[in-house]
Amino acid sequence: MKNLAPLGKMTAFYIPSHKLDGPGFASDGTARQAIHEFLISHYKAYTHTPSPVKGYWLSGRDVLLHDVMERFEVSFDREESYGKLIEFLASLAQRLDEESIYLTRGDESFLVARAP
């Protein structure tokens, strides 16, 4: 269709709300600012759902954990772009002291482990 511009495969990830604006994330600002700058500079657009989503999961010790999270969504059509996002999220998880970040791409879900 000539009125459509394909954007590629949709990818979404979730970040704990209380860690997005907390002080001490980095000397260069908040996690929210870092995410915004990364997504705009690499993908030129993204959407953010500020209304909280609650996530539940079992820890490695079978303890039920939960958190309120915010959703970020971006689309791209090159695997190289996907790799850059995964590297960014692994680094972000480490900086936020998270074991992993939940990510969906198309109809698949993943946990992006924190960088060492």
Image: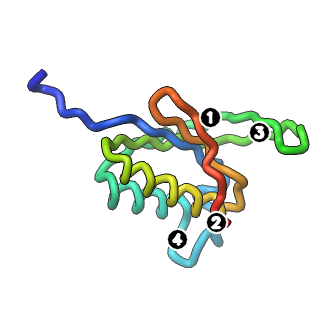
Residue lying at 44% horizontally and 53% vertically, measured from the top left:
83
Few, some or many C-alpha atoms within 10 Å of disc 3 (few <14, some 14-19, many ≥20)? Answer: few
Name the element at disc 3: strand
Name the element at disc 4: loop
How far apart, in angstroms, are the residues tagged by discs 1 and 2?
Answer: 21 Å
Few, some or many C-alpha atoms within 10 Å of disc 4 (few <14, some 14-19, many ≥20)? Answer: few
Give amino acid for label 2. Arg
**Residue lying at the far left of the rendered structure:** 2
Question: Mark 1 = which residue?
Answer: 53
Q: Earlier in the sequence, mark 1 or mark 2?
A: 1
Give amino acid for label 4. Gly
Q: Position of residue 104 (x, y in %)?
A: 53, 36
Give above or below for 47 relative to 95: above
Question: Mark 3 = which residue?
Answer: 66
Question: Mark 4 = which residue?
Answer: 29
Few, some or many C-alpha atoms within 10 Å of disc 1 (few <14, some 14-19, many ≥20)? Answer: some
Question: Mark 2 = which residue?
Answer: 95
How far apart, in angstroms, are the residues tagged by discs 3 and 2?
Answer: 19 Å
Q: Position of residue 1 (x, y in %)?
A: 13, 21
